[in-house]
Structure formats: C-alpha cells, structure tokens
Image: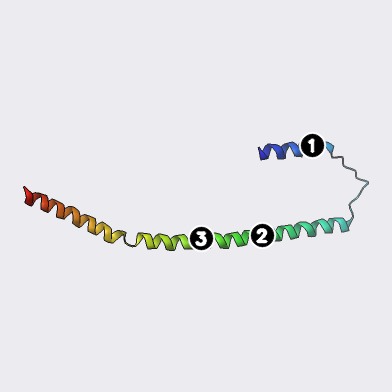
Amino acid sequence: MLTGNLLAWKLVISSQFRFNATAAVSPNEVAGIVVKFKQFQQRIEAKLHAGLVELRDCSDKANRHLAKLSAPIPGLVTRLAQAKIDLQVLSVAAQ
C-alpha cells in the first residue's frame, strides 16, 4: 500500500517536472541543501548507532537470562534419568 502510494506520488511529481537549463541553481542553494541532508544523515546515523547499542544490550541481557534458565538443565536431566532407573527397579521389585 505504502509502496503504491509512493510510486503514484512519484509519477505525479515527474509528470509535472520541466527542466529549465536557463534557471541555474546557485552554489549557495546547493550548499544549503547539502548541509541540510548531511545533518539529516548524521541524525539518522546517530539513531541507528543508538539502536545498535540498545539491540546489543538486549541481546546480552537475553543471553544472560537464557544462561540462568538453562544452567539447571544438565542436573535435571541426570535426576530424570535416575528417576527412570529407580522406577524400573521398583517395577521389577514389585513383580
């Protein structure tokens, strides 16, 4: 939907555009636009960097949480295996 709207807008804008070689763009205008978009780029890059730091922090936190949750698993597996053996022994003894 958004892509379709963007493409439709592009068609409208391009159909209205008429290049006029006699109306040159001043270097000051170009410099102003360059500065504007350079600042925009820097803000976006700063946000991306902050997002990356936040994502890494979340990943580290998730890994620590997972380590805590998975730490008792080997002991529980051993206890389960022992319980199965105990059950087999008790079943044989009961017969």
Residue at 90 percent of width and 55 percent of height: 26
Within-10-Å neighbours for mark 1: few <14, some 14–19, many 20+: few
Label disc, if present, on residue 45 of the rendered structure: 2
Residue at 24 percent of width and 59 percent of height: 78
Kindly state the secondary structure of the residue where label 3 is placed.
helix
> Is residue 9 depicted above or below 40 in this figure?
above
Q: Quadrant of the N terminus?
A: top right
Label disc, if present, on residue 58 of the rendered structure: 3
Where is residue 89 shown, x and y percent of the image?
Answer: 11, 53
Q: Amino acid at mark 2?
A: Glu
Within-10-Å neighbours for mark 3: few <14, some 14–19, many 20+: few
Where is residue 62 shown, x and y percent of the image?
Answer: 46, 60
- Dot 1 or dot 2: first in sequence order is 1
| Marks 2, 3: nearer the viewer | 3
Q: Amino acid at mark 1?
A: Val
- The answer to whether marks 1 and 2 mark residues whose Cβ atoms lie closer than 8 Å is no
Within-10-Å neighbours for mark 2: few <14, some 14–19, many 20+: few
Q: Amino acid at mark 3?
A: Cys
